Image (cartoon, rainbow, N blue to C red):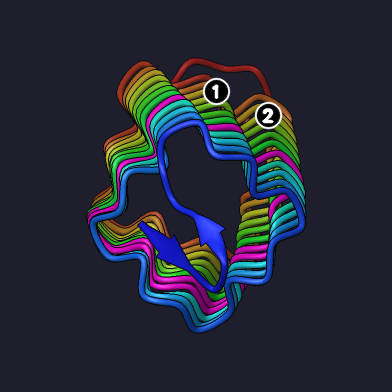
Amino acid sequence: MEVNGYTIKPGADLRGADLTYTDLAMANLTDANLSGADLRGANLWCTYLNEANLAGADLGSTEMTGVKLPGANLSGANLAGANLSRAHLDFANLTDAFLIFANLTDANLTNANLNSARLEHAVMTGADLTRADLTYADLTKANLTDTNLTRAKMERAKLEHAVMTAAKLSGAKLVGANMRSANLFCASLPRANLSGADLGSANLAYANLSRANLSGANLSGANLYEANLEGATMPDGSIHN
């Protein structure tokens, strides 16, 4: 398959390639090298990019519904405004990736590395981020409704004004996270580590915080109406009965 003079095949060397607005739907680029490539506006619908190198690639506003990216390297890539709904990004490396306003609805991001990723305003409803690394990630005003963040690493993450209604955060590590004014209505946080987290003015109504660690956390102005705090370690170190 030839596109813009480039051979599209597994293992292809497409470093720095200009693939803007090209149609690569369902193409097989498994293990291809696309580092620094320009894919803005391209159609990557259900494209196979397993184990591909997309470090520093520009995928802004790209159509990527159902794209296959397990194990791919997207460190430093620009995915602002990209449509990644139902994408497979399990075990992918997205360190320092730019995902502002990206659509990750129902995406599979299990075990993905999103350390320091920019996810402001990203839509991640129903996404699976089980065991994902979101340390230092910026999720300000992101939509994480019904997102699975079980055992996710979210130390020092920015979640200010994030919508996390019914999110699953069992065993998640949120040490020192900024969750001011976040909406955690009906969220599930049993055994989550929220020590030192800032939950000022957060909505935790009906949230499950059983056996959660809230030592040193800021709960000033937080809404804890009907929240389950059984066995939780409170900010002062006491155990809630």
Q: Decide: few, some or many residues near mark 2? Use Cα within 10 Å; few <14, some 14-19, many ≥20.
A: many
Q: Is residue 14 magenta?
A: no
Q: Position of residue 153 (x, y in %)?
A: 57, 26
User: Which image quadrant: the C terminus?
Assistant: top left
**Of callouts 2 and 1, which one flags the residue occurring earlier in the amino acid sequence?**
2
The three-letter code of the residue at mark 2 reads Val
Query: In this picture, which residue range is highlighted in magenta?
Result: 78-106
Residue at disc 2, secondary structure = loop
Instruction: Give the main secondary structure of the magenta stretch.
Output: loop
The Cα atoms of the two marked residues, 2 and 1, are separated by 6 Å
Between 206 and 8, the residue placed more toward the observer is 8
Cβ–Cβ below 8 Å for labels 2 and 1?
yes
Please tell me the numbered disc located at residue 175: 2
The three-letter code of the residue at mark 1 reads Asn
Residue to which mark 1 is pinned: 193
Q: Position of residue 141 (x, y in %)?
A: 56, 73
Q: Is residue 147 visible?
A: no
Where, by quadrant of the figure, is residue 159 drawn?
bottom right
Left or right for 145, reference 184: left
Where, by quadrant of the figure, is residue 70 drawn?
top left
Residue at x 41% of width, y 34% of height: 10
On screen, residue 88 above or below 183? above
Residue at disc 1, secondary structure = loop
Where, by quadrant of the figure, is residue 120 drawn?
bottom right
Q: Is residue 86 magenta?
A: yes
User: Which image quadrant: the N terminus?
Assistant: bottom left
Please tell me the numbered disc located at residue 72: none
On screen, residue 18 above or below 1? below
On screen, residue 173 above or below 57? above
Q: Position of residue 73 (x, y in %)?
A: 61, 35
Left or right for 60, reference 72: right
Left or right for 107, reference 143: left
